[in-house]
Image (spheres, grey):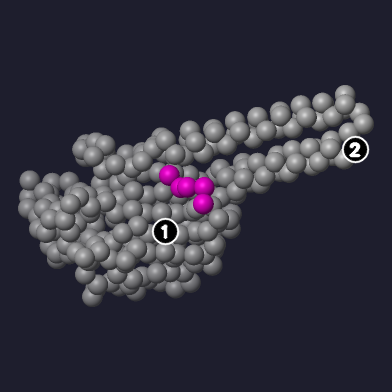
Amino acid sequence: MGNLKIEYWLYGLITVMVVVFIWSLIFMHKKPKYKTIARDIVIVFALLAFLFFAKNYLFQRRNYHFNIEEIPAYQNEAYVEINQNIPLFSKQDYYWEEGKLQFSELDSLGRCGIAYAKLNTSLLPNKEREPLQKVKPSGWQTIRYDDLIEDKYLYNRCHLIAYELSSINTEIKNLITGTRYLNLNMLPFENEVAYYLRKEGKPVLYRVTPVFVGDELVARGVLMEAESIEDDELSFCVYLYNVQPGIEIDYETGESKRK
């Protein structure tokens, strides 16, 4: 059962409780025995509602706060699961307007912030993406390592919310300086979301957070979260490393050298 359906189920429980309580007051005031039964029913429903709320919100979704210092150092794995792969969306996030995109304003160093969306099929592109050649995200450097990287160039202009999910291409608030390695490893998660949208046609909560340390111009990595709202078919919460095997990156400037 998806989270939105869960919410409706919870509200349904509360509605039943209220109806039973009012019914007991109106019709059972002369029958104490039945009034006691109605009261007990309300208590049971109230207990079920509380246990459900505690399980799904207090214990599961609010017991973890992302902290870059807790992320293990890169160990030849492109990503690590965060919070047992459970997205960190708040209760309020599920009521966002469908088809809505939100990009953070650039900070004083020209760096991107959180990109957030409630994706649906209306956002999917109907034409091929045009090349990105003039946009320069924070820390951008044009550097080649022909013998180390199949596509030659170290850096790509990485979309936080992929073009295939949003139809947004040249928005500077949606682009970071990412290694070719990062860009390629974001792709399977983006494809998974795109496939779900096309196959199921149901909305998806989606958020990508670039993680910067101090005043560094290049992100250390990105936190990617996605969750299908109306079912349990799609859900992930992963941190991907902005690294390139064989190359040492200066995250303060974007400069690099061979290891």
Above or below, comparing residue 23 to residue 112 in the picture: above
Asked where in the image residue 137 lies, by quadrant, the reply is bottom left
Q: Nearer the viewer, residue 237 or 22?
A: 22
The image shows residue 198 at horizontal and vertical percentages of 54, 59
The image shows residue 127 at horizontal and vertical percentages of 44, 73
The kind of secondary structure the magenta stretch mainly shows is loop
Above or below, comparing residue 88 to residue 160 in the picture: above
**Residue beneath label 1, please?**
116
Question: From where the camera sits, is residue 96 visible?
Answer: yes
Q: Is residue 95 rendered magenta in the image? A: no
- Helix, strand, or loop for circle 1? strand
Q: Residue at x 16, y 56 (%)?
A: 215
Q: Nearer the viewer, mark 2 or mark 1?
A: 2
Q: Nearer the viewer, residue 12 or 141?
A: 12
Asked where in the image residue 115 lies, by quadrant, the reply is bottom left
**Residue beneath label 2, please?**
27
Q: Looking at the picture, which amino acid does disc 2 mark?
A: Phe
- Residues at marks 2 and 1, CA–CA distance in whole angstroms: 50 Å
Q: Which mark is residue 72?
A: none
Look at the image and tell me in which quarter the N terminus lies.
top right
Mark 2 or 1, nearer chain start: 2
Q: Looking at the picture, which amino acid does disc 1 mark?
A: Tyr
Above or below, comparing residue 206 to residue 43 in the picture: below
Question: From where the camera sits, is residue 152 visible?
Answer: no
The image shows residue 23 at horizontal and vertical percentages of 84, 39
Q: Which residues are magenta?
A: 88-92
Q: Nearer the viewer, residue 78 or 100?
A: 100
Q: In the current view of this chain or complex, which residue is farthest to the front? A: 30
